Amino acid sequence: MTNDDLPMALPPDAEARRAVPPVICYPTDTLPQPDLVLYRAARAGAVKIDEVIAEPREAAAFRVQAGQFFRITSVEGPQVGDLNLWNLHDPGERFYSGKTRALHGTHLTNGHRMWSNFPHLRPMATIIDDTLAWYGADAFGGRVHDVIGTRCDPHTHHLLSGEDYHHCCHSNLTRAYARAQGVRVGEAAELVHDVLNVFMCTGFTQDTGQYFMKASPVRPGDYLEFFAEIDLLGALSACPGGDCSSEHSSDAAACHPLLIEVFAPQEGALEGWQSSPRNGYSGSHGL
């Protein structure tokens, strides 16, 4: 018998404690809001200037200037993608999935932003169009585009299986960054970070609270589109789990490419807009 099997006596006020209502940790009433009307108007006249394909079980890097747009599209079959973002000029500023989750929730959609890490803490990109926004929450608590999962990686794969596997999203993103920036693989691996799981349908089980995945509702033609708030280097991995309906980090799942397109707005379309400055905290930490 383990400690988990031992009977547990409930305190007399157990139900009263459970009944305490929750409080939102970070109320966002004062959070600066994106001007989606301006962004979408600028997008309407934008011209495509680049495209990149993330091949199945591989990743592709791309560059987007502040004020431009990028779109991630399913082109052949159901496929999820793991997205990393860095400041194009400073790789020390990168996407902070944990704080993004704390501000917006476990899954992102229209109007939500991808925030950068400390001490910068500013918007890197804003979602302006999501063709899967209709999905909402299903009966299992599943939602789409999560900032829960960390990315499939070769270290956890080896821990659980004892095998090396080099097409986990962490390794895919590492190779894409190393090639794009001309740096050694070890340096690139240290800059890869927790992701936005584009198109992935996930949640937490009600009984054990475990992170789950299920078949993505994405279909060819579905896309997630972003406005670049700063100059960005991005990398997108076409996850080896395919639509994540069964497993990831293997060659068993059917996988498909993902298309990344970059669009530039017409001159003057974003009049009055500017990138957000880095966070204004003094950095003294009380000393």
Image: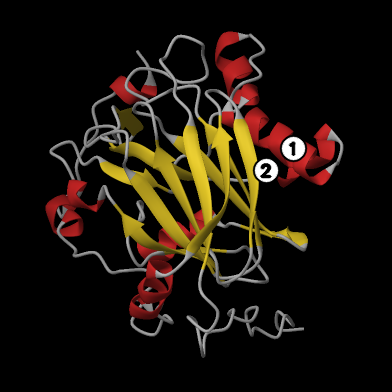
Tell me: 146 left or right of 131: right
Assign a secondary structure to mark 1: helix
Residue 251 percent coordinates (x, y): 51, 11
Assign a secondary structure to mark 2: loop
Q: Is residue 229 above or below residue 216?
A: below
Q: Which of 111 and 116 is in front in this view?
A: 111
Pointer 1 with pointer 2, Cβ within 8 A: yes
Q: Mark 2 points at which residue?
A: 192
The picture quadrant where one finds residue 212 is top left
Mark carried by residue 189? 1
CA–CA distance between discs 1 and 2?
Answer: 5 Å
Q: Nearer the viewer, residue 182 or 118?
A: 182
- At a point 70% along the width and 79% down the height, the residue shown is 285
Residue 130 percent coordinates (x, y): 31, 54
Look at the image and tell me in which quarter the N terminus lies: top left
Task: Give the residue type that dot 1 points to.
Answer: Ala
Q: Can residue 148 be seen in this snapshot?
A: no
What sort of colour scheme is used for the picture?
A: secondary structure
Q: In this view, does 96 lie above or below 81?
A: below
- At a point 39% along the width and 85% down the height, the residue shown is 30
Tell me: 49 left or right of 253: right
- At a point 37% along the width and 37% down the height, the residue shown is 200
